[in-house]
Image (cartoon, rainbow, N blue to C red):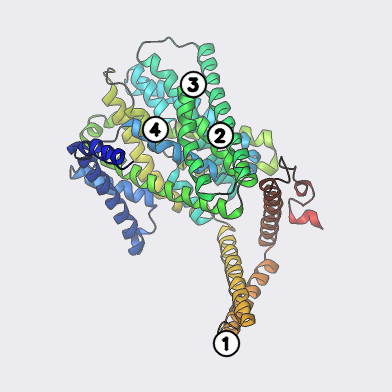
Amino acid sequence: MFDSVMDFFIAVEPALEDPAIEEHLRQFCLVLSVSLGVATLSRVFSVLRNIPYTLLLLLVGLGLAVLDVRLINLSPQLILFIFLPPLLFEAAWNLNWKSLKQYSVPVVLYAILGVVICVSALVFGLQAFAGASLATALLVGASLSATDPVSVVALFRELGVDKKLTTVMEGESLFNDGVAVVAFNLLLGIALGLEQFDVSVTIARFLVFVGIGISIGGLIGFGLSFLTQRFDIPLVEQSLTLVSAYGTYLVAEELGGSGVIAVVTTGLILGNFGSRIGMNPRTRLVVSEFWEFLSFFINSIVFLLIGDQVRFQGLIDELDKILIAIALMLAARAVSIFALGALSNAVTGPDMDLPVKGQVILWWGGLRGSVSVALALSVPAMLSERQEVIAIVFGVMLFTLLVQGLTTKPLLEYLNLLGDQPIKLEYNQMTAQRAALTRVMQRLETMKTNQEFDPEFVGYQMALVAGQLDTVKENLAKLEQQNDVIREFASNQLREELLAIEADTYAEFIRAGQLKNSLTPLLEGVLPDRIGESH
């Protein structure tokens, strides 16, 4: 055994000494150092706290590009095969299926018809007003149809923006990315002159791509969900989610489907179904924290490298086309959001209405980011218009991230869309404080019972904690009594907690071998959806 290990290290040693590998490691460490430095500075200096972290990284990357400091070569394969699957999986994992189902009509309309409107407007507009070739117009249109509102969604969560807006924007982005990638692949052959456009053939190929993606994602998602019912090993279950993100993408792409749609499907199933029936609360927390870290880590690298890859001379050369593309994109986004929003409101009824103010934010918050860049960079070198496509896409992306991204928060405040969200955040914080202080009191009572410390000292500590706990409880009671919205919010949170306890209990029985299959939840139809229904 010793000889085989030594032989292994002898065989690997030349590769470790390869100058190229050493240089890549240096570049990677440099990127991480810069990213973490930006993260630290954004928390140290208050003036930087109002800038979303991803946009701050982009600005630093642009600064490095101005100084002609290139950190690393960013290939489209790196984004599509290494960065994109975990980012999509993390977003899908955290997207609540019940909320997505509630707002499925606007999400589907924006994700599918919105892409068609955006591509059509850019294709015809760039040819008519900018004199672009058909190939350039097709590829720019397909690339820019992919929305990537990472920083906007993060801002929504931080400010506690209405759940409807957050769900619609995040849901649209997830499925929109898949539709945009499929559209790009379909239009690439036409741009290269290898295929002729045929509506029926294009629709059929689109349905095949999406169908295979959903099928593969569903098989892997449900398969892993039932597999994790049989054991409770947090690190293994965490690793399985990571493998599923990459494995689903690669398998779907290999079988001719949409890897993006497949990953989103798997993430939705595991986040909403598998994590409930196959993971206990502690494991779910471990897995969620892991994906939160991975998303932060990858976004840090992606946005820094995107800014670093900008070629300013190319942007200057194509400035007229970039400006026209920005105007066309904003106009197309307005048509899709407001026209499809009106259609959605007509279909869903008043309870699910998207208000006009909300539609304004959806329009302005439709940023373009890593997916658009990856698609533009993946244009084959054989196409003479490749650099033109890349310059236009980069220019539009920078406008959306720097102008739209940095003005979204002031727009939210101007439209008064924060509404009751700050008070809900305050309620959540006080609820967390109450739970934490209650646990502290339980620990002190145990210490007093077991006589672990001096009784007088423990009694003094209990008096201090009890005073704080009483104050928090009084503030919570006042908040609930004075605000109907908070009472309904608290009721809905309690309902979700009770449903989760029921699902966790069934999962424990399955892991113990006392049940073979998960039972249909009984409380789903018993507990009232709204506080008013309980009276």
Labelled disc at residue 265: 2
The residue under label 3 is which amino acid type? Leu
Determine whether, in the image, residue 70 is placed left or right of residue 80.
Answer: left
Q: Is residue 414 above or below residue 442?
A: above
For discs 3 and 2, the disc positioned in front in the rendered view = 3
Q: Which residue is mark 3?
A: 255
The residue under label 1 is which amino acid type? Tyr
The residue under label 4 is which amino acid type? Phe
The residue under label 2 is which amino acid type? Thr
Disc with the residue nearer the chain's start (3 vs 2)? 3
Q: Mark 2 falls on what kind of element?
A: helix
Q: Disc 2 and disc 1: Cα gap in Å?
A: 54 Å
Q: Is residue 355 visible?
A: no
Q: Disc 3 and disc 2: Cα gap in Å?
A: 16 Å
| Residue 489 at x, y percent in the picture | 66, 57
Disc with the residue nearer the chain's start (3 vs 1)? 3
Q: Which residue is mark 4?
A: 81
Q: Which residue is mark 1?
A: 460
| Residue 267 at x, y percent in the picture | 54, 39
Disc with the residue nearer the chain's start (4 vs 2)? 4
Q: Is residue 42 above or below residue 388?
A: below
Disc with the residue nearer the chain's start (1 vs 4)? 4
Q: Mark 4 falls on what kind of element?
A: helix
Task: Name the foreground residue: 344 vs 245.
Answer: 245
Identified at 28% across, 49% down, the residue is: 60
For label 1, the crowd category at 10 Å Cα-Cα, with few meaning under 14, some 14 to 19 and many 20 or more, is: few
Q: Disc 1 and disc 4: Cα gap in Å?
A: 58 Å
